[in-house]
Amino acid sequence: MSTPMAPLARIEDLHISFGGVAAANGVSFTVEHGEFLAVIGPNGAGKTTALRMVAGILRPDSGRVFFEDRDVTGLPVSARARLGLGFTHQIVRPFYNFTIIENVMLAAGHGQTVSPWRALTSRSRDAAREKAQAILERIGLAAQASQSPRALPLGQRKRLEVARAIALDPKLLLLDEPLAGLSSAEATTMADLIRTLPGQGITVVLVEHNLGEVLRIADRLVVLDAGKVLAEGVPGDVMARTDVRQAYTGVV
Amino acid sequence: MLFVELIVKGLVYGCMYAMMAVGLTLVYGLLRILHIAHAGVFALGAYMTVTVANATGSLALGFLVATVVSSIAGIAIYRLAYQPILHHAAFVPMVVSIGLFIVMQEGFRLIFGAYGIAFDNNPWYVANISLGGINLTYVEVAMVIMSVVLLVGFGLFASMTRAGIGWRATVTDPQMATSFGVDPVRVRYVNFLFGSALAGIAGGLVGLLNNYVEPTMGGAVSYKALAIVVLGGLGSVRGTLIASLVLGVVEAFGAIYLADIFDRDAIGFLFLIVVLMVRPQGLLGRK
Amino acid sequence: MSAYVASLVSVVGINLILALGLNIITGFCGQVSLGHAAFYGLGAYTAAYLAKLGAPLPLTLLAGAAMAGVIGIVVGLTSLRVRHDFLAVTTMGIGFVFLGFVRKQKWLGGELGISGIPGPGLDPVPYALLIVVFAIAVTIFSFWIKRSWMGFTFDAVADDEDAARTVGVNVSTYKLTAFGIGTALAGLAGGLYIYFARIILPDTFDFVQSIAILTMVVIGGTGSVWGVFASTIVLTLLPEVSRAAADYRLLIFGAMLMLVMRFSPGGLAGLVKRKPA
């Protein structure tokens, strides 16, 4: 495609403080269609906070979030999810009283859950079940469909989290540390899995500590430090910068 | 003058509520359970006080027995009713507590009769003193003194003794406390012991105040105590104390000024609901 | 059917509507409510007041249900604001505020309530059958909700609200819907009750009544329609089976509540089978 498209999302000058401490001090960046963007930075840089503001879980003190040119800063999480802005938690939150496939079905049936009236008058779960089944197969959880999330190890629960988010038909998916707590083999598998998402039409922004995997799979990096954007660009360029290395190690 | 009198009376009732509410807050802070059966312990204390006092002629003995029996009852409730089901959602122990309260209340009715017992010899009921123009019965004065003594005593215990500090640590951060060698079960026993003793004594005092002990007396006070626990926010003892006094005063004024619209018991809850709408975390809770 | 049986059937029917309504709020959607009797009372008082003014039965029932449902939604708004554990006390408070208000209002009869309520225009037996029709309709409605996407979404809200939000569920709207439906049903029960009792007293709608309704839901198995249906019938008829048991009715309720929750929190339904989605 040669015509330049407007960015899928614009994050403009986000500020937020907790108990007098500024966790975000003017965070701004854009997200382009179809890219795989990683937000990285040292501990306490405010990465997760920024992501949660984009998702709508936190309300910024000031600043704006635009999604598809629309100001979503005031919208709650569920409204953003319906617009196509999805989010997965770092500490996974499956519905423990549902089976794996039911977890995904609820998301897949988002057309039926849009309003209580719609929900009351919809009975059939077949379409949602089929869609959920297909997603589970793509994600590699088809064998566990009838199990409870309690029976699954962390790696699979994290995949469930992604599967559920995909079922919402998002255009942009925000992932909060999807590789946290995984063994290196699991992390590689997970990284490979989410790498395929832009190919399926889902733009990805993730916050991650695991630099090894991130540098391998990301198209572009945004580096945060002390609540501000320090650098952005392709991984090779960004990681070569002295200020970036200094932020991480404290040493030039 | 009416203004001051209302405040004083309100504070007196506030002290009574505080004695109940502190026990509830202690349990809630530690276990996140709404210990509704606490009302039963209150009534138990009242019944013990009146029956022993009538049988032996000694109020002091009555109170002593009430304290001991209530403490034991409280610990028994924890051990038999709550401890085995702590791993369930909070709804479950709360409903068990409600069931237990009903059983206790009905038990009192079936054993002691529905119409209540009066003290044979209650000199404190009529005797009163005048402080700056305001009449307070001896019981009301005793209530204030008792609650101040007990609560200050507990405050000292919590800040100056090893057991007390261990208790505070457990409430704030149970895992940290255990790693420092604090025995969580013992802390819970102390919790229930002290809270229940307070409730039992409060029951005896209220029985003296009204010169009357009847099966449903636990209800009104303890429902308000629940409201106070919520109002004070998140299991904070200090919040509970302040909320108790505030509620006592609000109720005193409300009972006069809103007398045509709501009865006395509703006022406390009305206040609670209004406050929660404005501050969902309670008066002193943290979000 | 004798008049005695008709009155039994009527009480069972009314209790079914009450318990199933609470089951939608607490069992389906996971919102604790210890003040359900207040909505029963709201419906009853609304219907009784209108009935004495001469309003016909269908209108009074509708008004009772509507009043209870609207106030229920307002109360539901409180559930959106407060923490889970506080909701129990808040709903308990609603019950006391209602009672405290009604006891003081002369135009509602004060402590003496409303008496001299006109009959329903039907004999006791046909009226009992009318109540049964309503109870069955409510039961069918409960099953419908459970099998629909509303039931599915309620389950999610009850399980984990924040996770529900991330899958696009407007949690607030669903909670308010649960409250509105459940309380409107309580109001309907109240309206049906007045023609049966012909006199209503404030004390009928007190905290003990709220707990009695909760007991039927809990013992049946919070969330299970069959369980609640069965336990309501059993618990309502229990005092009738043994006259001697009548004095112990509340004691038995309390004991059952305590023992069932202590040993089988899923209620009867929990003993029979696991809850399917």
Image: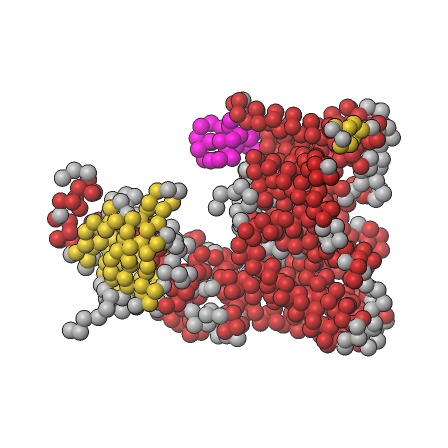
The quadrant in which residue B249 appears is top right
Where is the N terminus of chain B found, in terms of image quarters? top right
Main SS of the magenta part reads helix
Where residue B201 appears, as percent x and y from the top left, is: 71, 31
Asked whether B61 or B243 is in front, the reply is: B243
Task: Specify the farthest residue to the front.
Answer: B1
Which residue is painted at 64% across and 37% down in the image? B245
Which residue is painted at 24% across and 66% down in the image? A7
Q: Tell whether C230 sits left or right of C243.
A: left
Where residue A235 appears, as percent x and y from the top left, is: 16, 54
Judge whether B282 appears above or below C67 on screen. above
Judge whether B144 appears above or below A72 on screen. above
Judge whether A226 appears above or below A32 on screen. above
The quadrant in which residue C210 appears is bottom right
Please state the extent of the stretch shown in magenta in the rendering: B165-188
Judge whether A119 appears above or below B79 on screen. below
| Magenta span includes B169 | yes
Q: Can residue C87 be seen in this view?
A: yes
Task: Specify the farthest residue to the top.
Answer: B161
Q: Tell whether C138 sits left or right of A148.
A: right
Where residue C31 appears, as percent x and y from the top left, is: 57, 57
Asked whether C275 or A210 is in front, the reply is: A210
